[in-house]
Structures are given as C-alpha cells and as structure tokens.
C-alpha cells in the first residue's frame, strides 16, 4: 500500500485500501475485466498496422462513468 500511496499521493490511504478490498472481495470480476481487456489488446495487435506507427492503444472506456 505504501508504494501505491507514494506513486499516487492524491488517492490517499483510504482509497487505496478501498480499492484493494474491492479487488480482494471481487476477484472473479477483476479477472474477467482483465481478460476482456487482454482480448481487446490481442485483437488490436492482430490488426494490420503501419510499421513504425506509434498509435496509442484504445480501450472502450466511457469517461462519463466514474
């Protein structure tokens, strides 16, 4: 936890502990989300790209939902 608070001081210890608690209590949900994101990354890698292109990976996040 100390490392996360040092890297992201604006979060504070309570939010870090809350996130860790959520992840621990919902491991299946977290693993499913990670698998979905990995599938999206794999799909993007398989698509043809211009050699040397520096495009950023796009994931389907809705910024209005926080």
Image (spheres, rainbow, N blue to C red):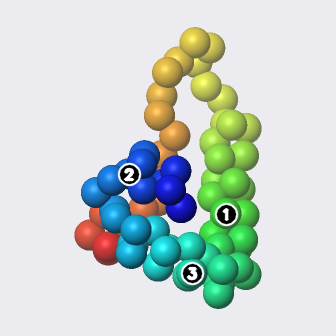
Mark pair 1, 2: CA separation: 21 Å
Disc 2: which residue:
8
User: Measured from the top left, where is residue 45 in percent x and y?
Assistant: 68, 37
Position of the C terminus, as image quadrant, is bottom left
Query: What element does badge 2 sit on?
Result: loop
Q: Mark 1 = which residue? A: 34
Q: Earlier in the sequence, mark 1 or mark 2?
A: 2
Q: Quadrant of residue 14?
A: bottom left
Give the secondary structure at mark 3: helix
Q: Residue, x 49% and y 21% (percent of image)? A: 54
| Image coords of residue 4 (percent x, y) | 49, 54
Q: Position of residue 31 (x, y in %)?
A: 72, 71
**Which residue: 34% across, 64% down?**
12
Q: Nearer the viewer, residue 3 or 29?
A: 3
Residue at (49%, 74%) from the top-left corner?
17
Residue found at x 52% / y 50% = 3
| Residue density around tag 1, few if under 14, some if 14–19, many if 20 or more, within 10 Å | few
Disc 3 + disc 2, Cβ < 8 Å = no
From the viewer's side, name the closer residue of 45 and 66: 66
Residue where numbered disc 3 is placed: 21
The one nearer the camera, 13 or 53, is 13
Name, please, the residue furthest toward the front.
Answer: 2
Report, in whole angstroms, how far the alpha carbon at label 1 lies from the one at label 3.
Answer: 17 Å
What's the mark number on residue 24?
Answer: none
Q: Residue furthest bottom?
A: 25
Residue 1 x %, y %: 53, 61
The local crowd at label 2, few if under 14, some if 14 to 19, many if 20 or more residues have their Cα within 10 Å, is: few
Q: Earlier in the sequence, mark 1 or mark 3?
A: 3
Q: Is residue 52 left or right of residue 60?
A: right
Q: Secondary structure at mark 1?
A: helix
Q: In terms of sequence position, does the residue under pointer 3 or pointer 2 come before the other? A: 2
């Amino acid at each position: 936890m100390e490392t996360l608070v040092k890297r992201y001081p604006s979060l504070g210890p309570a939010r870090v502990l809350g996130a860790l608690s959520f992840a621990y209590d919902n491991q299946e949900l977290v693993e499913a989300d990670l698998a979905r994101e990995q599938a999206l990354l794999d799909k993007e890698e398989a698509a043809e790209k211009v050699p040397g292109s520096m495009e950023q990976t796009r994931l389907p996040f809705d910024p209005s939902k926080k």
